[in-house]
Image: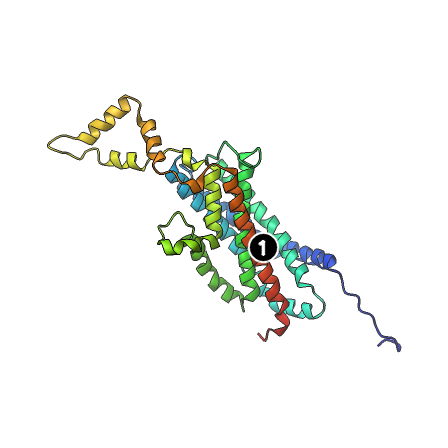
Amino acid sequence: MVNGRRKIVRRRGRVSQTIIYLGKLFRMFLFQNDWKVLPMSAVIAGLVAFAVGGNIFKTMEGTLMGTFALSCVCIWNGFFNSIQSICRERAIVKREHRSGLHISSYILAHMIYQAVLCLLQVVIMILVSTRMGVKMPDKSLVTSFPLVDIGISLFLITYCADMLALLISSFAKTTTAAMTIMPFMLIVQLLFSGAFFNLPEQAMPFTKLTATKWGLTALCAQGDYNSLPMVSLWNNAVKMKNYEVGGEKPLQDALVEIEKKNKREEILLKCAEQNQNPNYAFDVNVVYTCWGWIIGWTLFYILVAVIILERIDKDRR
């Protein structure tokens, strides 16, 4: 009461609250060293490009390994972006929610901010990779630009991991707890990628729960995996060329004869034909399906995070 009159407290609307928190997040980016995730993503991308970038989108084996590595980078970046974002200010969120904070506005501000951060990381990844000589696909399925197609897939993987980390941050008691959960979730994402590791048949349904499975599949499809040569058999034959049978070296003789007749590339493609994977078909529907799954899981993580934080007043922690 003020001079016998009830004081009317005007609460800001959802849009105003979103803008306010978005401004706060960008100030934290500048003044609390949150910007450090950008150079870190450049370093990780450089290491991956150096280690496995030589054969990605050139051979079947190189593409599978390279797309798995790129997916890992995206998951790593996304997790580190937001794993501590909410839990480090949980007490503040709880207090402000009691004062009229709309959780949907708070989460939306994080979504917009993290989207910008993920986009910058993907641009950095692509720039670093191409500068280090990584060959990108020269054909596209969705847009007119192959790099844009690849960039969309990398962004969706990164953002999905980011929102999963945001969900973890919304229910973790402390930043220490959140950082303890993160390695476990990272292992799950990598182990259940559905392609790089030979999983038992009963474990395969769990791969649909991970962004790595759908991201790796989309990247392989965009890289036209099934049209690439397979070099494992040839490389193993070369290693065995000095193997002797009855004082002769039949493998060496065969390899020399194949080289003389310029049949090497033909044999590599024949090997590839026997190992094509319909899941990696160069088909726009494959890419759309993968993107749909990633977007679906992203929205699910956001929804659950909102539901959890709406109950923050009942939290006795």
298 or 101: nearer the eye?
298
Q: How is the image coloured?
A: rainbow
Which image quadrant: the N terminus? bottom right
Residue 44 visible in rendering: no
SS for dot 1? helix
Q: Is residue 129 above or below residue 85?
A: above
Residue 32 visible in rendering: yes
Which image quadrant: the C terminus? bottom right
240 horizontally vs 281: left or right: left
Measured as percent of width and height from the top left, residue 144 is found at 57, 33
Q: Is residue 137 above or below residue 178?
A: above
Measured as percent of width and height from the top left, residue 108 is found at 65, 56
Callout 1: 10 Å neighbours few (<14), some, many (20+)?
Answer: some
Check disc 1 and give the amino acid type.
Answer: Leu
Residue farthest toward the left in the current orientation of the protein: 246
How many numbered circles are shown? 1
Taking the spot 69% from the left edge, 55% from the top edge, the residue there is 23
Q: Is residue 179 above or below residue 148?
A: below
75 horizontally vs 12: left or right: left
Measured as percent of width and height from the top left, residue 40 is found at 51, 49
Res. 122 image quadrant:
top right
Measured as percent of width and height from the top left, residue 205 is found at 43, 54
Taking the spot 64% from the left edge, 72% from the top edge, the residue there is 313
Which residue does the numbered mark 1 point to in the structure image? 299
Taking the spot 55% from the left edge, 62% from the top edge, the residue there is 169
243 horizontally vs 138: left or right: left
201 or 240: nearer the eye?
201
Res. 277 image quadrant:
top left
Residue farthest toward the top in the current orientation of the protein: 261
